[in-house]
Image: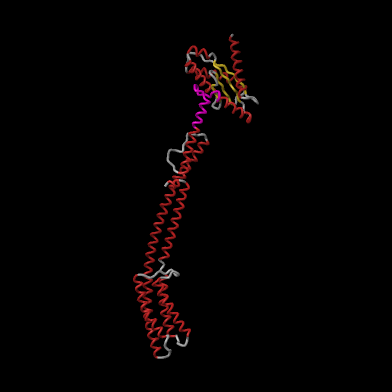
């Protein structure tokens, strides 16, 4: 059974079914030909015709005429051959030996033929136009007429018997063909079910699975349903590959994510920045790199504890996520240092970015008041041709510290 659950085994099974039905149809055809009653009827008809030929030849034979005598001898020989064909069969003509009542009648007719033949052979030894010859011809004619009537009866009986055999054969053939048709219907249904169950259904699932993988949907699976053969192994291979990719992505996210805030870490941020720089060089895309630092963060930790400091970092992460768009990149790159890639923003928007971050932070603190006042310093730098990721981040860091120094100088 295992061999018929593979795709190649399935099609081998279907081929075997087709060959089997072909062989059965051939057998039915042979059965039909076997019950053809024409050879036996033809041979019986020859007996009747040759009885007439024998009577005619007896009237025309002349002892001094070798041709007529040869004709009479040929009629006798051909009649003997016809009896042999009826009683013993003839492979060349497809004639089977007659059986049953028909055989009894043919044997009785053969016995009558013995007397007729004896009269014909005696006639060949006498001289024509003598009383003895005329008597022989008269007796031969009488026996020939009796033989002709018996041959007629044999022909009629053979025709009736063979018609019955043909009718029986037709019923058998009809029954066989109906059985073949039912078998073909069942086999076709089985072949369709096996094709649907073992080939088309799993191939459809594999196609949908491949399209889902191409779209990045790694949560799809071939399924727990058992599918044998090559397609089943392929589906389970897809599931194993998906599990491996999911684990790999989880490890990559873990390696590039900040555990405290859920944002990208420095590694993830730098990888994203390098990709955006490459895209900017090809497509002329403008973007801005922002560096955000929490003011007096150490005082929060010292005054309220590290749990409060962690909460402050999570609040800032939420404020930054609310400020920037979905396509922008927000990351925590160090203890209280955050960085943002604002895609599409240029130098004109730097002031908006600074005010936007601070407004979002104020709104966050208004929704969830804390025992401390959280403030940040923001530095922003626009991308430029030939810039590297390290250079942009360094420039944004320097801009942030410049603003922080300027604010402190103004406060003093």
Q: Position of residue 380 (x, y in %)?
A: 60, 20
Q: Which residue is drawn at the image coordinates 59% and 22% (left, top)?
A: 289
Among the 4 quarters of the image, the one containing residue 228: top left
Q: Position of residue 411 (x, y in %)?
A: 58, 10
In the image, is residue 27 part of the stretch drawn in magenta? no
Q: Among all residues in the image, which is located at the extreme right?
A: 385
In the image, is residue 261 part of the stretch drawn in magenta? yes
Residue nearest the viewer, comparing 225 with 62: 62
Q: Position of residue 273 (x, y in %)?
A: 59, 26
Quadrant of the rendering where the C terminus is positioned? top right
Q: Is residue 143 left or right of residue 262?
A: left
Residue nearest the viewer, comparing 212 with 140: 140
Q: Is residue 142 left or right of residue 338?
A: left
Q: Which residue is drawn at the image coordinates 59% and 17% (left, top)?
A: 400
Q: Position of residue 149 (x, y in %)?
A: 37, 78
Q: Which residues are magenta?
A: 246-267
Q: Which residue is drawn at the image coordinates 38% and 68% (left, top)?
A: 163
- The type of colouring in the image is secondary structure
């Amino acid at each position: 059974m295992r061999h018929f659950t593979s795709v190649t085994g399935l099609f081998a099974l279907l081929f075997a079914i087709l060959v089997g039905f072909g062989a059965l149809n051939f057998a039915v055809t042979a059965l039909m030909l076997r019950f053809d009653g024409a050879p036996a009827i033809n041979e019986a008809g020859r007996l009747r015709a040759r009885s007439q030929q024998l009577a005619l030849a007896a009237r025309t034979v002349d002892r001094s005429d070798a041709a007529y005598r040869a004709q009479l001898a040929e009629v006798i020989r051909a009649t003997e051959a016809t009896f042999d064909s009826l009683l013993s069969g003839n492979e060349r003509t497809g004639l089977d030996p007659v059986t049953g009542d028909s055989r009894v009648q043919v044997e009785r007719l053969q016995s009558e033929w013995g007397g007729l033949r004896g009269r014909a052979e005696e006639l060949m030894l006498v001289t024509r136009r003598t009383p003895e010859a005329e008597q022989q011809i008269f007796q031969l004619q009488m026996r020939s007429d009796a033989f002709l009537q018996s041959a007629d009866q044999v022909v009629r009986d053979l025709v009736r018997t063979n018609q019955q055999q043909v009718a029986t054969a037709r019923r058998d053939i009809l029954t066989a063909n109906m059985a073949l048709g039912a078998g073909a219907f069942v086999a076709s249904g089985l072949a369709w079910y096996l094709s649907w169950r073992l080939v088309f259904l799993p191939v459809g699932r594999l196609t949908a699975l491949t399209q889902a993988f191409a779209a990045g949907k790694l949560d799809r699976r071939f399924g727990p349903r058992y599918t044998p053969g090559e397609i089943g192994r392929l589906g389970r291979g897809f599931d194993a590959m998906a599990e491996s990719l999911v684990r790999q992505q989880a490890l990559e996210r873990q390696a590039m994510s900040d555990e405290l805030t859920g944002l990208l870490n420095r590694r993830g941020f730098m990888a994203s920045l390098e990709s955006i720089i490459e895209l900017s060089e090809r497509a002329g895309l403008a973007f801005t790199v922002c560096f955000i630092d929490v003011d007096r963060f150490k005082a929060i930790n010292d005054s309220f504890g590290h749990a409060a400091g962690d909460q402050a970092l999570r609040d800032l992460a939420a404020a930054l996520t609310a400020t920037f768009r979905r396509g922008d990149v927000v990351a925590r790159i160090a203890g209280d240092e955050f960085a943002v890639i604002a895609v599409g923003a240029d130098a004109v928007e730097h002031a908006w970015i600074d005010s936007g971050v601070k407004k979002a932070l104020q709104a966050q603190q208004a929704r969830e008041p804390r025992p401390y006042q959280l403030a940040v310093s923001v530095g922003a730098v626009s991308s430029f041709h030939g810039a590297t990721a390290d250079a942009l981040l360094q420039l944004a860091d320097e801009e942030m510290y410049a603003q922080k120094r300027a604010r402190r100088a103004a406060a003093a």
